[in-house]
Image (tube, rainbow, N blue to C red):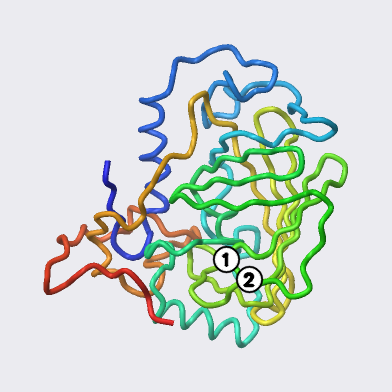
Amino acid sequence: MKTPLLLRARMVAALLPLVLSSVLLAQSPAKKPADTTGRENAPFSRNEEDLPKGPAPRLAEHPDLSGYWVPSRKDKPVGNLGKDLPGFKLPFTAEGAAALKYNLEHTVDPEALCIVGGLPRHNASGLPFQLLQGADHAVFLYWYTTYRLVPFDGRKHSDDPDPSFFGEEIGSWEGDTLVIDSIAFKEKRTWGDENANPHSDQQHVVERWTRPDIGHLHVEMVVTDPKFYTEPIHYQRTWLLGKPGDEVREYSCSEDNVDAPHLQPGPGPIGPDGQRGYEKLAPLPPPPSKDHPAVTSIPE
């Protein structure tokens, strides 16, 4: 199936999880009793009362965080780094406020042009993701065929790491908590969340991942960026365990992207609830023509 992106840079972020979950529900096998790991036969539902019950599975001496994880409806607004702040207002420096203004007026949503969302954006996303945990690495698999690999084998940060969208990520365990410390981020072609909030190359992200029971995965994230924000930003949310057969699937971001020629800067309308949504979308544009070819990149 070829799936075009919707108008105005990825405002479909609020709609796509609903579409994907409907497709997956139709494709998944019948409900089975939960097994001891909670991954093979756990029922899928976004209703808390329908989640499997019991302690989190373990892998050697640590909890096994593996699973297909679906956003909880309790975490609102989706896609907003300021979710837990009064009025969703981020503590911008003057330079940070200028960077936000630039994104709103000049920058097309990078993910709409198939550029990796990175951190902290993926932790605020409305899409499910899949986590696979091994003996000394964990991999996060995201829709749009994006991934990140996190080692927890005792290594330290490099002296001069190359900037990247997810940063240089180093994991470690503090008891039953997986701590991920990330530095060295790209500044250009990045948004910190769905709403065009910026981050700089001075960003430092610390994530603390826990699995309190078989059905829930929780993250507490602190984003420190002295160039753009006057104080650290605290963000937390919870995901629910998916059902059997749920997994990320191949997604060709730029294939048949009929909307690319019509993409405009900024995230589009953001409601008083702090998030953009599909109900705010304009009608779909016509497909590209030779006079208006598809956009495949954005300017520096």
Point out the residue furthest to the left here.
Answer: 290
Q: Horizontal and vertical percent for residue 122?
A: 56, 55
Q: Amino acid at mark 1?
A: Phe
Q: Amino acid at mark 2?
A: Phe
- Residue at the spot of label 1: 165
Q: Quadrant of the C terminus?
A: bottom left
How far separated are the C-alphas under marks 2 and 1? 6 Å
Mark 2 nearby-residue class (10 Å; few <14, some 14–19, many ≥20) = many
Most foreground residue, 294 or 278: 294
| Left or right of 16 in this view: 209 | right
Q: Looking at the picture, does residue 285 appear above or below residue 229?
A: above
**Residue sitting at x 65%, y 72%:** 162
Circle 2 sits in a helix, a strand or a loop, which is it? loop
Q: Horizontal and vertical percent for residue 99?
A: 53, 82
Q: Is the residue under label 1 in contact with that under label 2 (CB below 8 Å)?
A: yes
**Residue sitting at x 43%, y 77%:** 104
- Residue at the spot of label 2: 185
| Left or right of 208 in this view: 298 | left
Most foreground residue, 165 or 13: 165
Q: Looking at the picture, does residue 227 appear above or below residue 41?
A: below
Quadrant location of residue 51? top right
